[in-house]
Amino acid sequence: MNMSPSPEHTARLASLGSHLRDLRQQSSLRRLAESTGVSKPTLIAAERGGDLQLSTLLRLLQAHGRLAEFDRFVATLAVGEHQIGEPA
């Protein structure tokens, strides 16, 4: 079942898209698509606030040298005594 994002998530996706567009700066969509393996239509949709897969976001963050910030964010998501991604 494919559900549309809530209005709150839509606003967050729009903000994320704006940040992704800012990160790209003067680089072309073609160049970013080639370096990440993400299609131009997917890049355009992401920059316009479209829903995107986590793997796509990770590729884009890596291309922009921002993957460490994502890793720090994930590390803050503690579940009990374990961090997400660590074996229980």
Image (cartoon, rainbow, N blue to C red):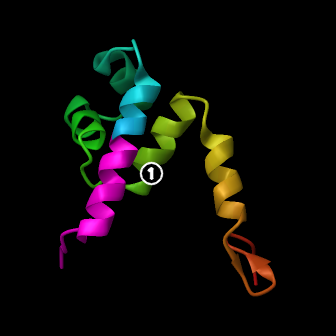
At x 29%, y 35%, the residue is 43
The vertical placement of 31 against 72, above or below, is: above
User: Left or right of 15: which side holds 42?
Assistant: left
**Quadrant into which the C terminus falls:** bottom right
Picture coordinates of residue 37 (x, y %)? 38, 32
Quadrant in which residue 86 is drawn: bottom right
At x 61%, y 50%, the residue is 70
Which residue position holds label 1? 55
The vertical placement of 63 against 6, above or below, is: above
Residue closest to the eye, 43 or 47: 47
Residue closest to the eye, 22 or 79: 22
At x 68%, y 43%, the residue is 68
Is residue 15 found inside the magenta-colored segment of the image?
A: yes
Asked whether residue 35 appears in the rendered view, the answer is no
Is residue 71 found inside the magenta-colored segment of the image?
A: no
The vertical placement of 61 against 2, above or below, is: above
User: Left or right of 54: which side holds 71?
Assistant: right
Instruction: Give, as a single range, the part of the protein colored magenta.
Output: 1-17
- Residue type pointed to by label 1: Ser
User: Left or right of 72: which side holds 70?
Assistant: left
Q: Residue furthest right?
A: 81
Question: Mark 1 Cα within 10 Å, few/some/many (few <14, many 20+)?
Answer: few
| Number of numbered discs overlaid on the protein picture | 1
**Quadrant into which the N terminus falls:** bottom left
Asked whether residue 75 appears in the rendered view, the answer is yes
Picture coordinates of residue 12 (x, y %)? 36, 56
The vertical placement of 7 against 47, above or below, is: below
Main SS of residues in magenta: helix
Residue closest to the eye, 71 or 11: 11
Q: Secondary structure at mark 1?
A: helix
Picture coordinates of residue 22 (x, y %)? 41, 27
At x 18%, y 69%, the residue is 4
